[in-house]
Each structure stands twice: as C-alpha cells, then as structure tokens.
Image (spheres, rainbow, N blue to C red):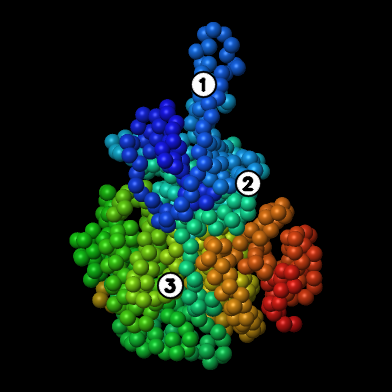
Amino acid sequence: MRIYQEENKIIIAEGKTAVWIEPWGEDTARIRMTATPEMDGHEWALTEVPKKVVPVITSEEVDVTDPWYQTEEWKKYHQKGTNWQMVIGKLTVKVSHEGWLSFYNQKGELLTEEYWRNRNRLNRYCVSLRLDARELKPVPGSTDFALTARFEAFDDEKIYGMGQYQDRQLNKKGATLELAHRNCQASIPFYVSSRGYGFFWNNPAIGSATFGMNRTEWTAKSCKKMDYLIFAGDTPAEIEEKYSAATGRTPMIPEYGLGYWQCKLRYRNQDEILAVAREHKKRGLPMDAIVIDFFHWTRQGDFKFEPLDWPDPDAMVKELKELGIETVVSVWPTIDERSENYGEMADKGYLVNADRGNQNHMTWMGNTVFYDATHPGAQKFVWEKCKENYYKKGIRCFWLDEAEPEYGPYDFDNYRYYAGPALQCTNTYPVGYAKGFYDGLKEAGEKDVLSLVRCAWAGSQKYGVLTWSGDIHSSFRAMREQLQAGLSMGMSGIPWWTSDIGGFLGGNIKDPAFQELLVRWFAWGAFCPVFRMHGERSPWYEREEEFRNGVRQLTSGQDNEVWSFGEDNYEILKKYLFIRENLREYVRDCMKTASENGSPVMRPLFYDFPEDKEAWNHEDSYMFGPDLLVSPVMEAGATERKIYLPAGAKWTDAYTKKEYEGGQMITVPAPIDIIPVMIRDGKEYHIYTN
C-alpha cells in the first residue's frame, strides 16, 4: 500500500484499488474509491462547480512498533509508518499509516471515523472479524461492484434527513433505510448529525443505510465506485448551506407557490374545474392554483387534452388567469403501447428497457412503459410534446406524477436506462424528470419554475421541485408520519414540500371523524411550505364504465372543496385560507432565504436552537421559518396541546396572547379551530384576531 499526495489530493493506492481524498468546497471533503485502473467519471448530484479551496496537507512519520509483541519472532513488525492529514477549513481528515480515515472539526473533536475490524497486527482493533471499512466486491461476470462502507457508531449521535420515509421517527438513529424510491418514499442519502457534520452518499444505486448502535453501514448492490462527502459546521444551518452549495440551491419560488392550491382526484372536465374556480372567487376566497389531475388525456403518453372533456383549454386557462389562478396539469411518464408517440420513442431508445420478460412496466388503465428520464433526448422529446399541447395554451406549471417511477413490481435488477442499469442509477430518475421540464421552461423564457413532483433525489431542488409525500392514508397516524417526512425532506435539502391535506386514500367527506382529521390537517397545511388540498375522497362516484377509442375512462372521488365538509367546518377552513394569505410576505421571505442559503422553510426545533440540548428531543413541533413555532394537533378528540419552547427566546401564544420564557414545557388550548402557534421574541404576526 502507498499513501501519497498528488496536487490537492491524498491518494491511498494498493494494486488496482485507489482512494482519493480531496476538498470539495469550504469545510468539505470528497472521498472516492475505485477498484479499477481509472476512477469512474459520473458526478451524479455534484453538478455544481465547488468553490476552489487549497487544503493544508501534511504527513508525519511515526513509530508503529506493536507493544503486544515483544519476542524476537515479532520484531520484524517493528517498522516506521506515515500518517497523513488534510485540513479543509473547519474539517480535518486524518489518514492513518494503515489507510483508515477519521474526521475532526477545528476544535480537534472527532466527528466520525471509518469502522474496521481485521487481523492486521498493527490495528488498534485487532480482532478476527475481518471487516474492512470499505469494500468493492466484484459482481461476477461484469465490470461492476457491490459496495459496503462502514463507520463507527456513537451512542450520543442523532441523525436527521435521508429523505422521506413513512415512519414516526425524525431521528433516524437505529433505523435501516432502503435506498430506493417508492410511492410515498423518496430516498435522499444526506443527513445532518448532532455531532456537527453532514454526510452525503453520492451514489444513486439501490442499496441500504443502517444507523445501528454497533456501526453505521452503507451498501450499494451494484456500482462503479464509492463516493461520499463529509461537511463540517458549527450549526445545522451551516451544514445545510454547505450541502446545498455542493448539490445546488432551490430557485426562488413563483408567486403562485405562496398561496392556496385546490386539487382533487379528479376534475373530469373543463366545466367542473371552471365551476369550482368561479365559486371559490364568488365567495371571496383566495386561490393561487388549481390542478387538472391525471387521465384528462387521450392516452397515456400522448401528453394532450381529451377534446371531448376539454374542448377549449385555451379559453379555460385564460379565464383562470383572469381570476388570478394558475393552471397546473398532471403529466405521467407512462407511455401506452397504443400512444401516438410510442413507436417513435421506442425507435429512438427513449423508453426504459427490461432485461427479461415483456416490456410493460405498469398495467393500470393500459399497458405502459416508462420513458427514460435519464436520456437527454427523451427529456427534450417529452418537453416538446408538453410545450406544444400545454405550454402554448398558457400552462407553465406541471405536476410530474409517478416520478419514482412506480414500477410494478419494483424489480430494479430488470430495468435499464440510458445512464446504466437501474440497480446503479434508478434513484436519479426523478432528477432527470424534473430537469427536462426545468430546462424546457427556462429555454421558453420562464423566469420562475415550479414542478410538483412525487419524488426527489439529491439535487432535485435546483430544478424547482416541489415534492409531496405521495398516496398516503387518511388517518391521524399518517398525518403524524407526514410531519416527520416534511421535516426530514427539509433537512435533506428539499425546501419545497407539501402533503395531500386530509390524506389521499380513503376519507368519506360525510364522516365526522374524517371531517375532524381534515380540519386539523388543513390548519397544519396553512403552515407548510406549500398549502395544497388533495385526496381521492371515497366513495368514488358511481358511473357506468366508459370507453373512448378503446381507452377506459376514469371516474372521480367525492367533492373536495372547502365548502364540502359542512358549514361549521367551512368557516374554520375559510379562516385558514386568510391566515395563509396574511402570512404571504413572511412565507415569501422564508422562500427567499431558502434560495439564498438552502435553509428549509419548515425545520426541526434544533435547527434554530442548536445550543438547547432539549430541543433535539422534541419531534412533534417545528419552526416555520425563523419566527413561528407550529404544533399540529395530531390526535382525534384533542382539545389541548403540550409544547416544548426552546430556550434562548421568549414566546407569545398567537391564540391566547400569553407570553412565556423559553426552556420549558407548556400546555395550551387547542380547540378544533386552532392550531397552536408560538411567535418568537415579540414579532408582530396577527395570526388569530380573537
């Protein structure tokens, strides 16, 4: 093994295996490993040019006599070795003479280090497990490798981020997470540690991350190299800023992203959607966007309106714009085998291929194949169709659904993209999907771009992605899970996030239990980055099964407008429409900050109060921007709410106007029409006017 410096890198070389350690912007190191003669060139999420940083690299020869062995037989192990060190601002990377890595902050405190347990007699962990810190094991008969990377575990460590998973735990310590996308699951392999560092696994392969009590372990089933970044920072906010600098910052959100979005599954035709918009405005209610959901098209993959249901979309979009409402249109990446575009896309290699079996990836409402969103030509092809059939009619916001994509089944070893086997790169699919529309809209002259996307990976944020949490259940349990999902997405570098208010699956609008859930969720939605109503609202309307040109037509769920749930509930929902409107300037400022430094709009309490150790333990409240502490009511029948107030600030209850010192638990009233909101340090936000 050789360890040496080459320009700004430290290289550990042994045979065909090489590890590169180099700076990647301020206080940041990039670690790559290959088991082939050349390093794989994929940058994946690292498309931003890092700030040029000159590291301080030093080496020191050390005596590595092993005191365990004193006999003549072992004297041959008495030798000299060289330890290396790279200082990148607040981050120090130490490379031992054995080639193992450890990471320290500017105070000399250990952040994290590699985990190894083998029989090297010079190893301080001299045991017979024969576990190395990093392994690239060849996949037989290929040029690919299965990857495992191991790091030490720390009892006091808390882990935040990693994307969106359907569980209750904000702190991922103790969790095993699948590194794969599914409906309701978005894998974004970045986390912020309570120990003062961030970690980004720059690898879109299918794999897993385990944050065990005995070790942390990352795996990839198939890849070309190991590639990760370590960020050092004094606060979570500082770490987020460095991560967003490396993977890209979200742009400024369009103005229509600040207000209320109306949506349901589904408005079946032009008359229905215009009737809802007109009634909303007739009642004097604010609305910024209304959504035309799926199956408004002729066939999947045609990317155009069905003229029988949408006879004059140009006039519809024009009227909605005159009402101050943006039209949002659903696009699916599914191409029906009967689509007018199928043949051309297949001939040009624009469709995802299957390595075995037939080419159908989904059979819901037709035999369909996903288009290849990793293919630049396919990205442009799909955008050009949508430009011709939607954008030229005045539509500039697209709902990019099925963005995982939602394979049936999720046999990732069977699919192949332009970018490579799905096992190696499928997690980048939603990035390419959003990028195609972002590039097209920018080229068409749009200044501010927003796409509603049902998945994300690292870097999605720079393409104007608003992620929502998928087809979740209508229950308080699901609502509680979405709170941590939204906070985790924010900590993963995705500032624009929303959920289906009231949940998607189930939810009878006549059921008082569901009405209570919806009211609580709606109040919370007013304090989410984007305020959006949606849901299937069972039971579905009973209509005779209808076919047009051999294409089955989809029916829709029950009504889902704010006046659909009873007069008393309507008054509450109406109140929150105006609360959100009154906060418009505040939300705009939060979005501006997100675009400037990557700060999430909704974030855990510790983000703003990292010095308060107790703030790291409370996961059921959050900061909405720097000044508002929000505590959603997530239990049926609740009339009050316990809240922890972080130390270092004074707090005013927006409802009762009572003032509190931080650093304590309090109990506040939470009647059905109130979501507890605490205002920081006497700021003036007139949320409740009682």
**Which numbered mark, 2 or 1, is in the foreground of this view?**
1
Q: Is residue 547 visible?
A: no
Residue plotted at (39% across, 42% down): 225
The tag earlier along the polypeptide, 1 or 3, is: 1
Q: Nearer the viewer, residue 566 or 429?
A: 429
Tell me the kind of residue under disc 2. Arg
Residue plotted at (48% across, 62% down): 249
Tell me the kind of residue under disc 3. Val
* Quarter of the image where one finds residue 147: top left
Q: Quadrant of the N terminus?
A: top left
Q: Is residue 399 visible?
A: yes
Q: Nearer the viewer, residue 87 or 129?
A: 87
Q: Residue furthest top?
A: 72
Disc 1 to disc 3, how far (Cα)? 59 Å
Task: Please determine whether, in this image, residue 15 is positioned above or below residue 535.
Answer: above
User: Tag on residue 195?
Assistant: 2
Task: Please determine whether, in this image, residue 459 is positioned above or below residue 212.
Answer: below
Tell me the kind of residue under disc 1. Lys
Q: Secondary structure at mark 1?
A: strand
- The crowding category of the residue bearing disc 2, from other C-alpha atoms within 10 Å (few below 14, some 14 to 19, many at least 20), is many
Left or right of 459, for residue 647: right
Q: Are circles 1 and 3 on residues that touch, CB within 8 Å?
A: no
* Quarter of the image where one finds residue 6: top left
Disc 2 to disc 3, how far (Cα)? 36 Å
Residue plotted at (57% across, 14% down): 69
Q: Which residue is mark 1?
A: 80
The tag earlier along the polypeptide, 2 or 3, is: 2
Question: Where residue 132 appears, x then y in whole percent?
Answer: 48, 31
Q: Residue furthest bottom?
A: 282
Disc 2 to disc 1, how far (Cα)? 33 Å
Q: Which residue is mark 3?
A: 449
